[in-house]
Amino acid sequence: MSGVALEFEGLGKRFGDFAAVHPLNLSVAPGELLVLLGPSGCGKTTTLRMTAGLEFPSEGRILFDGKDVTRKPPGERDVAFVFQLYALYPHMTVGENVAFPLRTQGRSAVEASRAASAMLERLGLGMLAGSKPRQLSGADQQRAALARALVRKPRAFLLDEPLNTLDSAQREFLREQIRELHKEMEATTLFVTHDQAEALALGDRIAVMGEGKILQCGPPREVYENPNSLFVANFLGTPGMNFLFASRSGEAVRVQGADWMVRVSDLPDSKAGLGEAWTNKDGLYLGIRPEHVLLTGEGAPCQVEHTEMLGAYSLVDLRAGKVRLKARVPGGRRYREGDTVGVSFHPSGCRWFDAVEGNALPWHTQEVKCTPSR
Ligand code: ATP
């Protein structure tokens, strides 16, 4: 059975005067895994709870395969959900807990138990099938809760930070399992997280939320490479994008505080409708991800402030005048504190944002030269 086509039409939720979710429109294709990503309090859980039927919206509609389920109770939606702290039935063994949803669907005890064992085995919990939940660690209880949701093979999964309580090795293992099971079952999945690395690894698409709104929605690579705002650019990436405050200076851009001139080959023409941002006295931001900051020996001189060794790569903190930025370099390369290095930017990695609204500007940079201005 394939997943449902999920649709939000002007879906919003207010608690009193406070808009937790501003009216939003979103379509999730059958079998798609969509990640709702954003900082704490931005409305992710509320959106998920409305989808599950645990919270009724203040406005708008939710459609499953084109049918309005906005006011339907959870039991009539064929969704399975796992929330951050999901309670197992304490009087049942782990195996019985996982078999339970199948028993309520009318499957025989033997069949339900067999399917439960297979799912527990798959999630690395086979040995614990006969244990009671209180005998398990918090992380194992959470894995058992996942197994109980997954075993039902519903048409939609709603997962709210289900990996939060796990250590990093368990997170990686379960992330892999969720991705594989999702591919097999083709259930439409909404996965809530504030962890951008998890979102990039799991999602077919990511909807980045902030203050109750969807700010950008697209495939991980698209959102990472072409963020539509300073907020999204900063939220994705470890660390986020560097931002250099800049203003126009003749036919180039002067990076404020660093005494650098960045020469851009395709300067926007004011006649092209981009003049306002270009001439804006409030300036603009040049955004550049750490992996696009090149320490080539040529270009603008920067001082190395600190190097953080992170295994396969290192992060180098650089300073030029008042400007600070981070470069990501292969792990084997060594830079000493106080060294002067030449910095340039990979042109394809340069992004431009207006400094007032923080919106991305549709400028493409073909050539950038970083040179000291004096
Ligand atoms: P977190 O990751 O911390 O759970 P979130 O992005 O999932 O954050 P929500 O839990 O959806 O955010 O909450 C969005 C906003 O709505 C928050 O400011 C929260 O305090 C508020 N909120 C949520 N539920 C209620 C409620 N029942 N009554 C009043 N305010 C609420």
Image (cartoon, rainbow, N blue to C red):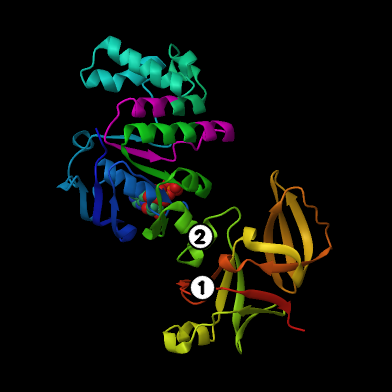
At which x and y percent is residue 321? 75, 74
For the residue pair 338 and 22, the one nearer the viewer reads as 338
Residue 154 included in the magenta stretch of the image: yes
Residue 105 in the image, given as x and y percentages of width and height? 22, 22
Q: Dot 2 corresponds to which residue?
A: 225
Q: Residue at x 34, y 29 (%)?
A: 149
- Dot 2, how many residues are within 10 Å of its Cα: few (below 14), some (14-19), or many (20+)? some
- In the image, which disc is placed on residue 308? none
Specify whether residue 346 is painted magenta.
no
Q: Secondary structure at mark 1?
A: loop
Image quarter for residue 10?
bottom left
Near-viewer residue (216 or 95): 216
Q: Is 260 placed left or right of 222 in the picture?
A: right
Amino acid carrying label 2: it is: Glu
Where's residue 60, x and y in %? 21, 56
The numbered mark, 1 or 2, whose residue comes first in the sequence reads: 2
Please state the extent of the stretch shown in magenta in the rendering.
144-173
